[in-house]
């Protein structure tokens, strides 16, 4: 018996797993006769209704009667019993409930059949008892969920009826052995509307003391969940910066996030109009004095100290305290530590601020600027002073304060904030008279500083743009050292966005501007940059020559960080390589030099090379500590978004992926995305690989978004891997080859060197090519099969070139060689059919390197062994693949395995003691209940899962134990020792 139609949601529900689990648990207990009520508190817009809708929908699908009543804000003319009248109206409109309603004529009063007697105590009691009896009778026919929304607007009569129902009526256990009440009550209210004298407060305090009533607070969503919600609300992805800004402004409020997303198509700026109206309702209910205080506080920012606010607003202390108390009681302001007040939500502050008149706004900003300047000029308040001076149009003071704020941000390792303050200073520079500008600086130097901050903050294209601006600002008579600094800085920034030829050109110019004699630090850094750019364009001889000369200069001058940077470059140039013990020893020396010199970017370069060297040599476990240490160092120095830390973030996730720690990989990436959302392919890559392997082909569409905007090397690499593999898994060799070739072309450097990833992309594309060739061969189309075999030959040649002569001219390490072995095996399959020896080589190559690829190759080996009629060996491989696919949750691999087993009639027979490992933990629980004779429904009820899910588990158990019936499965389980007889209770 279901009282409401199934609900259709347009807004996705994210991040409420714990709350849904708790409410679902209450419902499960209610179905068993443990009547309960939950009072759900949360601020407006936090998602109470959405959670209740989801729970109601799940309950209705499980056969629960769901009845929902809404309280409405009708001011002082509230209608008595409004939510209950709504519920009875729903029942009266459904003929299934006609007989139940007819048994309780007293309820006609609520349906318009008479006058609701609220004054006569006996009549009121009969009405209350009638509602309780009706609900109990409904619960006897089917489990019942009663939902009451927005209790903060409930009229007095509804509150009284609710008190009766929860304290004396429906939650009480029936006497005399009568059936238990199978019902639950979920009631929501806005916590931020409950000022101190709100009439709901005493009722809530009374109800939560009842043993069958609990309170649940719906807190703001974590940033990572808001980001998920924001991205889910738009068909086309929003830029990371836009998502990050919405997340910041929404502060965990789902409604605010939705409104801000809806406003992204309108001109940027303030708060959406509809949202402003909502936010100002409570503000306009304040007294004029309290409104004046809040307007002043809004100019101060999100938070303001009591003394500063008092001086700015100019009110007597007693009058100010009265106004503040009013704002706090209305939950617009929240008192904090140290005598501060903050707006409960930042958007409320924005709405109040936007309501100010322009002259009023400038006057108040000026007052705050003067007050802050007259206090202790702490470095921390320079940014505040800069803001207030700028908004009050005092530009010389704003310029000075912006530079002071930039210096403070640099000292505390906050490059994004430093960039913002330096750019603010640049914007002000031309508007300030030359006599009022700070001495000792100029626009070129400031722009160069901004570009460095942008690079450290991960805004790599912005860094290039700023350095180009600095180059354009150099006059004909510019200082040569400054001109060289600008050029080698531009070269370094161009390297970060993979503009290699241009980087080499600018580093060459920088080196030519400064004479090598007498030795200077400027020439030294120009040379160190030129070494890297020359190597990137393939001029290794020039790079090596310059590096050796510069290293001698660095040692002579005692410039340890430049010496460290050159040592790192020489590790790659002199042949020892970062994969060797000798190379790692030199890298550790470089790391120590950079650490002593206090140069965090160079130290991070050394740590990255140590980590990637371990990865390339196959030492995955040794790689993780170096990457983790590098990220810790980046975190301490505020450089987590800089290029090398981003590489290390990808590397750490990739190691977790290759080791088969998929859940950990996805969880860590999601956590980082909430903190550092602009990481692109660096954090998106490994989770996309996991998603695709687990059957989520939407990963391909998400990968395409990495190709939007300016060229991004890592985004292109990740997208190429995902899109090539997705096409291969869909059986589309044309598309797979197209993505492989376009990705390799985009990533090939100016010298024509193929990127390392070529061998992996070729192997992935070859899988689809071999599949198509095999299909055509089976149908007798030998000409078509030959064409695809020719394609395979071309792809494997590229794989060989990449693996043997990759970046730096060195052959790739164990991972690259494993991919080459797989590519060779796929080519053999395309040309003549599966070769067990070739696939055994691929399996051996991926052992201990990549759990998923190892399992994929073992599946191909099983296929090759089956074709060679080596069935027992094939069964062993198939069983190993099954276990690994189940452990990883690699659904596509499992499906392909099941298809092979079915086509080849392969029935592996695990030895005694091994079969238990085939079953998942949940399946073992289901098997135990099967042995006790439980039906699917009973299993579902005992394990709190649906009947359908229980049935799926039973089917899986039968298949894994090769049993034809439930009885046979239990017998096999007893024989194999998977279950033992459970002891019976003795009298």
Image (spheres, rainbow, N blue to C red):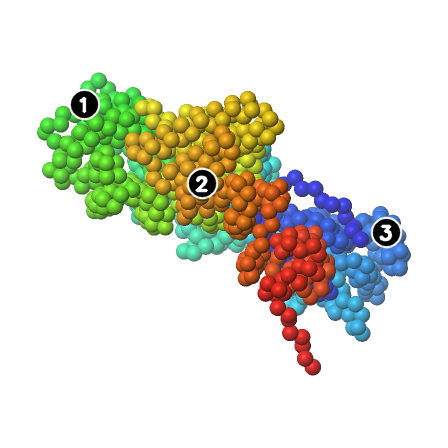
| Mark before the other along the chain sequence, 3 or 2 | 3
Residue 65 in the image: state x and y as whole percent: 77, 54
Q: Residue at x 64, y 70 (%)?
A: 981
For label 1, the SS is helix
Count residues near mark 2 (Cα–Cα under 10 Å), then give few for <14, some for 14-19, many for 20+.
few
Q: Residues within 10 Å of mark 3 (few under 14, many from 20)?
A: few
Task: Name the secondary structure under disc 2.
Answer: helix
Q: In this figure, which residue is indicated by the disc labeled 2? A: 837
Name above or below for residue 498 compared with residue 666: above
Q: Residue furthest top?
A: 476
Find residue 341 and report its horizontal and vertical position in percent: 46, 51
In this view, 331 is above or below 804: below
Q: Which residue is mark 3?
A: 96
Residue lying furthest front in this view?
869
Q: Nearer the viewer, mark 3 or mark 2?
A: 2
Q: CA distance from mark 2 to mark 1?
A: 60 Å
Which quadrant: the C terminus? bottom right
Q: Residue at x 73, y 50 (%)?
A: 61
Left or right, residue 272 beside residue 417: right
Q: Which residue is mark 1?
A: 513
Q: CA distance from mark 3 to mark 2?
A: 70 Å
The structure residue drawn at horizontal position 46% and vertical position 50%, both measured from the top left corner, is 661
């Amino acid at each position: 018996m279901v009282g409401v139609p199934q609900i259709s949601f347009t807004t996705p529900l994210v991040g409420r797993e714990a709350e849904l689990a708790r409410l679902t648990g209450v419902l499960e207990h209610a179905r068993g006769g443990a009547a309960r009520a939950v009072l759900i508190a949360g601020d407006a817009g936090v998602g109470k209704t959405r959670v209740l809708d989801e729970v109601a929908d799940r309950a209705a699908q499980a056969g629960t009667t769901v009845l929902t009543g809404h309280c409405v804000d009708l001011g002082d003319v509230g209608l008595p019993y409004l939510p209950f009248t709504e519920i009875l109206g729903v029942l009266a409109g459904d003929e299934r409930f006609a007989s139940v309603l007819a048994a309780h004529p007293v309820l006609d009063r609520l349906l318009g059949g008479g006058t609701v007697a609220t004054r006569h105590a006996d009549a009121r009691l009969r009405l209350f008892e009638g509602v309780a009896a009706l609900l109990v009778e409904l619960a006897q026919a089917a489990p019942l969920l009663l939902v009451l929304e927005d209790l903060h607007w409930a009229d007095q009569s509804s509150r009284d009826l609710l008190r009766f129902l929860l304290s004396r009526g429906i939650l009480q256990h029936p006497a005399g052995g009568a059936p238990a009440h199978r019902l639950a009550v979920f009631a929501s209210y806005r916590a931020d509307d409950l000022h101190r004298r709100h009439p709901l407060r005493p009722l809530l305090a009374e109800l939560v003391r009842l043993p069958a009533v609990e309170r649940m607070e719906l807190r703001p969503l974590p940033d990572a969940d808001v980001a998920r919600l924001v991205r889910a609300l738009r068909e086309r992805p929003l830029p990371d910066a836009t998502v990050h800004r919405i997340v910041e402004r929404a502060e965990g409020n789902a409604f605010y996030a939705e409104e801000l997303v809806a406003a992204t198509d309108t001109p940027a700026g303030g708060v959406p109009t509809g949202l402003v109206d909502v936010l100002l309702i409570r503000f306009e209910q304040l007294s004029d004095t309290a409104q004046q205080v809040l307007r002043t506080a809004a100019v101060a920012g999100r938070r303001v100290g009591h003394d500063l606010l008092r001086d700015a607003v100019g009110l007597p202390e007693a009058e100010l305290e009265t106004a503040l108390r009013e704002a706090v009681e209305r939950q617009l302001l929240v008192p904090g530590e140290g005598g501060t007040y903050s707006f409960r939500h930042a958007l409320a502050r924005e709405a109040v601020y936007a309501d100010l008149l322009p002259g009023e706004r400038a006057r108040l900003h000026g007052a705050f600027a003067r007050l802050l300047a007259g206090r202790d000029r702490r470095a921390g308040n320079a940014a505040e002073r800069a803001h207030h001076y700028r908004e009050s149009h005092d530009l010389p003071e704003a310029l000075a304060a912006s530079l002071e704020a930039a210096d403070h941000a640099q000292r505390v390792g906050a490059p994004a904030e430093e960039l913002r303050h330096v750019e603010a200073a640049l914007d002000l520079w031309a508007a300030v008279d030359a006599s009022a500008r700070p001495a000792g600086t100029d626009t070129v130097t400031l722009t160069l500083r901004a570009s460095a901050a942008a690079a450290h903050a991960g805004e790599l294209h912005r860094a290039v743009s700023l350095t180009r601006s600095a180059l354009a600002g150099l006059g004909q008579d510019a200082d040569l050292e400054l001109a060289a600094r600008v050029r080698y800085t531009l070269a370094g920034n161009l390297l970060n966005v993979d503009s290699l030829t241009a980087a080499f050109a600018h580093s060459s110019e920088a080196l030519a501007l400064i004479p090598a004699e007498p030795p200077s630090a400027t020439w030294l850094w120009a040379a160190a940059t030129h070494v890297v750019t020359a190597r990137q364009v393939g001029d290794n001889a020039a790079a090596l020559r310059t590096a050796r000369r510069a290293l001698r200069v660095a040692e002579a001058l005692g410039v340890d960080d430049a010496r460290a940077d050159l040592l790192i470059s020489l590790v790659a140039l002199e042949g020892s390589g970062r994969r060797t013990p000798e190379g790692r020893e030199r890298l550790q020396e470089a790391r120590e030099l950079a650490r002593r010199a206090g140069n965090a970017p160079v130290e991070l370069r050394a740590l990255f090379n140590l980590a990637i060297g371990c990865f390339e040599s196959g030492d995955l476990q040794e790689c993780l500590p170096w990457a983790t240490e590098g990220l810790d160092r980046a975190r301490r120095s505020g450089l987590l978004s800089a290029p090398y830390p981003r590489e290390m973030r990808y590397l750490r996730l990739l190691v977790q992926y290759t080791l088969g720690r998929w859940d950990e990989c996805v969880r860590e990436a999601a956590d980082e995305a909430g903190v550092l959302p602009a990481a692109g392919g660096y954090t998106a890559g490994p989770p996309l690989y996991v998603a695709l392997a687990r059957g989520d082909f939407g990963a391909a569409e998400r990968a395409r978004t990495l190709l939007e905007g300016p060229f991004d090397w890592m985004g292109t690499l990740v997208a190429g891997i995902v899109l090539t593999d997705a096409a291969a898994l869909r059986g589309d060799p044309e598309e797979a080859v197209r993505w492989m070739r376009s990705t390799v072309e985009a990533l090939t450097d100016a010298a024509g060197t193929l990127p390392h990833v070529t061998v992996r992309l070729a192997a992935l594309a070859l899988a689809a090519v071999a599949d198509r060739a095999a299909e055509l061969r089976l149908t007798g189309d030998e000409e078509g099969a030959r064409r695809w075999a020719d394609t395979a030959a071309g792809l494997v040649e590229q794989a060989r070139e990449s693996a043997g002569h990759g970046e730096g001219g060195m052959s790739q390490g164990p991972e690259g060689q494993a991919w080459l072995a797989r590519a060779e095996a796929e080519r053999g399959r395309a040309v003549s059919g599966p070769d067990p020896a070739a696939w055994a080589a691929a399996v051996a190559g991926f052992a201990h390197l990549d759990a998923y690829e190892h399992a994929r190759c073992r599946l191909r080996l099983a296929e090759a062994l089956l074709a060679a009629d080596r069935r027992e060996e094939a069964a062993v491989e198939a069983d190993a693949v099954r276990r690994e696919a189940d452990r990883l949750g690699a659904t596509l691999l499992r499906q392909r395995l099941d298809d092979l087993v079915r086509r080849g009639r392969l029935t592996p027979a695990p030895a005694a003691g091994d079969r238990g490992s085939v079953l998942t933990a949940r399946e073992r629980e289901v098997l135990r209940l099967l042995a006790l004779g439980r039906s699917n429904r009973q299993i579902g009820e005992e394990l709190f899962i649906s009947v359908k899910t229980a049935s799926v588990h039973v089917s899986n158990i039968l298949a894994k134990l090769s049993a034809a019936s439930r009885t046979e499965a239990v017998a096999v389980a007893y024989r194999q020792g998977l279950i033992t007889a459970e002891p019976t209770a003795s009298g």
